[in-house]
Image (cartoon, rainbow, N blue to C red):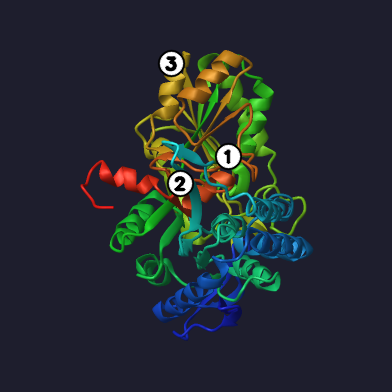
Amino acid sequence: MHQYIDGERRAASTGETFDVLDPSTDEVLETVTLAGPDDVDAAVASARTAFAEWSRATPLERATVLTKAAALLDERAEELAQLEARQAGKPIRLAREFDVPGTVDNTAFFGAAARRLDGMASAEYSGSHTSSVRREPIGVVGSIAPWNYPLQMAGWKVLPAIAAGNTIVLKPAEITPLTSLLFAEAFTEAGAPAGVVNVVTGTGAVAGQHLVGHPDVDMTSFTGSTAVGRQVMATAAQTGKRVHLELGGKAPFVVFDDADLEAAVHGAVAATLINAGQDCTAATRAIVHRSVHDAFVAGVADLMAAVRLGLTADEATDLGPLSSRGHLEKVAGMVERARGYAKVVTGGASPGGELARGYYYEPTLVSDVPLDCELWRDEVFGPVLAVVAFDDDDEAIRLANDTEYGLAASAWTRDTYRAGRASREIAAGCVWVNDHIPIISEMPHGGYKHSGFGKDMSAYSFDEYTNVKHVMHDITGEAHKAWHRTIFTLPG
């Protein structure tokens, strides 16, 4: 399968290829071309040429393309779901009910939002001038998307950028590029000029690095680990380009003593295990009031034991594999080391039998976790929940904020005042109350602290992908003379 540049599929100039594996079976799913610097250059040149036309398209013209693309994606929903499930190791139900519909909805949302790219209202100055604010596209955006939600993250990167009039070169993760290519083709089919959306299928070390440092790329948008995000910032700084980062997370799941415990237990299992825990907003740190701690741990352990691991194509599968063998080894290693300082209540192993071919790991609950250990402080990115107890509300808030990350959190309580305090004082870009994980196109997604900066989705994402221009008019024809004479002595 080839990359997508200037409205067509192209083999890479390198002649190199990469095997995309099915994480549930370790079998080759597809062989893709592996882009090099020359391919990135070609994609950027195509995007730069297309920008001249696309940036001048009317809001209606851009909205029409996005709306048609949403319809095309919806028509191909089952194909996209099957491909997404196989390349990313997702249960087919997750891909079919969450990933693909979410992307279609997000595309439709930006189809409408493209017509509401508003500046501020006009403002008067001394009765002689009037001001307005324009939002204008930045130019060519180089985006790097992660492997955990390949289709959705392609949407989060592409949609606000092109709705605002930018053009884009997207580099998906090399292990999950397949749905991004189909996504890009939908925009050309919907009427976008060739070069508005380009996809280069290469490694981060080669294609990604060249894209971030490219002098003709005006902005970089990156989703991935905090460590790589720092490298992206350093590279982008060499050419002074704007940077948008959505990085790691270590979400607290705070259960107060008055919470609906059954709801919290179900919420914890779903929020920990979604996408096999490979979600930067997933619940990873359960902070539970001491009075309900033991009941919470017992309830979560029982529910985790009922979760069905299986092949991604099986409709009964609740939990699929991790993304790669290397990532499986990383998650398993963190849990094995935790046995020396904490209690593994349930899970903590890979299943045997048919699933041993894939990269599966059991739902895992760890209690009695020290606050300075790696399992509590570092991003696991797997189906693992660590639990600690707290005694009062002040301690709960302190523990929730005792992390370098700040992407998402949740608070479970029946008390509206307690919920209000938690929402205000937990330092995270999203705080759910009595729920964890739901996202919608109308609301922004983005973090605090080392979880990055800037927003995906919603109209707030236009702040990332536009330049703000102040325009001031002399509306009298004489005002400029009076203003000039206050600081200069001029004839006439």
Q: What residue type is labelled 2?
A: Thr
Point 48% across, 54% down: residue: 466
Count residues near mark 1 (Cα–Cα under 10 Å), then give few for <14, some for 14-19, many for 20+. Answer: many
List x then y, in percent, for residue 367.
Answer: 49, 29
Q: What residue type is labelled 1?
A: Thr
Residue nearest the observer in this picture, 41 or 349: 41
Label count reads: 3
Residue nearest the observer in this picture, 233 or 389: 233
Where disc 3 sits, the SS reads helix
Residue 184 badge: none
Point 59% across, 45% down: residue: 458
Residue nearest the observer in this picture, 411 or 243: 243
List x then y, in percent, for residue 294.
Answer: 56, 20
| Mark 2 vs mark 1, CA separation in Å | 63 Å
Q: Which of marks 1 and 3 is nearer the N terminus?
A: 1
Q: Which amino acid does label 3 sit on?
A: Asp
Residue 272 badge: 1
Where disc 1 sits, the SS reads helix
Count residues near mark 2 (Cα–Cα under 10 Å), then give few for <14, some for 14-19, many for 20+. Answer: few
Residue 26 seen by the camera: no
| 145 over 36 or under it: above or below | above
Where disc 2 sits, the SS reads loop
List x then y, in percent, for residue 410.
Answer: 56, 30
Residue that numbered label 2 is attached to: 476
Residue 394 badge: 3
- Taking the image as shown, residue 77 lies to the left or right of residue 462, namely right
